[in-house]
Amino acid sequence: MLLDLREVHAHYGRAHILQGVTLSVAPGEVLALLGRNGAGKSTTMKAIMGLVRPSGGEVRFEGTDLAGREPHEIARAGIGYVPEERRIFTELTVAENLSVGRRPPRAGLEPWSEARIFEIFPPLAAMRARAGGRMSGGEQQMLTIGRTLMGNPRLLLLDEPSEGLAPVIVERMADAILRLKREGLTVLLSEQNLHFARIVADRAAVLEKGRIRWEGAMDALMADDAARAEFLAV
């Protein structure tokens, strides 16, 4: 497995958020981490990146334990993280934002370039000289993902990539993730949009109150009415 979490616990102060999360992501697959608000999806992402220090368990990437590593060290190891907040440099142009994310090539991977990003997200090509602060939310989401790809990650973490986007942009985002999967990139995404997850994901892991309560093929989840009603219905 490219990524392995074993019995991961995490706290915010006295609040016990992750209560023994165990999941694995295989090379080249898209795994959707599903669950209601507050289930622990974003905390799982942050625990992988070292932004929240696990209080127990193991996070292993390519067989290496990430315990104690700083977020920038984890990023350099090959994990790209796109947070829910779409953090871009609003005063920098699209081209400058992409340039900030550039990292050296990784062995066995075709390096990402500005041209490749524009193939994935064509609208960005026409905005190359536009400041990030003058872009829509959907355009900023594309730019954030593009900037992260410029780091040549082996694993891409996407936290709620479809949240707050217009339906046409959600479709474009789904197309982009499917293309990334075809190119062999491994993706772990947290989502509440079940329709979006169904389009892009191979497998699903469902969180409830900090625990994985269901895991399996995405098609199997869509066929399991009882599981969706118990763990995902609002």
Image (tube, rainbow, N blue to C red):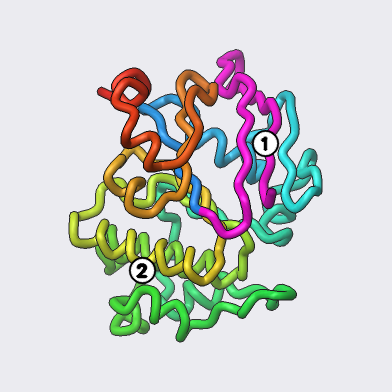
| Residue farthest along the top direction in this orientation | 14
Where's the C terminus, which quadrant?
A: top left
Residue topped by disc 2 = 132
Q: Is residue 4 magenta?
A: yes
Name the amino acid type tagged 2.
Gly
Q: Is residue 182 left or right of residue 230?
A: right
Q: Which mark is residue 5?
A: 1
Name the amino acid type tagged 1.
Leu
Quarter where residue 208 is shown: top left
Quarter where residue 127 is shown: bottom left
Mark count: 2
Magenta extent: 1-29
Which of the two residues, 118 or 196, is positioned nearer the viewer here? 196
Q: Is residue 127 left or right of residue 16?
A: left
Q: Is residue 233 magenta?
A: no
In this rendering, the answer to whether 12 lies above or below 89 is above
Between disc 1 and disc 2, the foreground one is 1
Q: Residue at x 44, y 62 (%)?
A: 144
Residue 51: x and y in percent read 62, 41
Number of residues whose C-alpha sits closer than 10 Å to that of mark 1, classed few (under 14), some (14–19) or many (20 or more): many
Number of residues whose C-alpha sits closer than 10 Å to that of mark 2, classed few (under 14), some (14–19) or many (20 or more): many
- Element on which disc 2 rests: helix
Q: Residue at x 69, y 25 (%)?
A: 7
Q: Residue at x 69, y 77 (%)?
A: 105
Residue 73: x and y in percent read 74, 55
In this rendering, the answer to whether 188 lies above or below 43 is below
Residue 101: x and y in percent read 57, 70
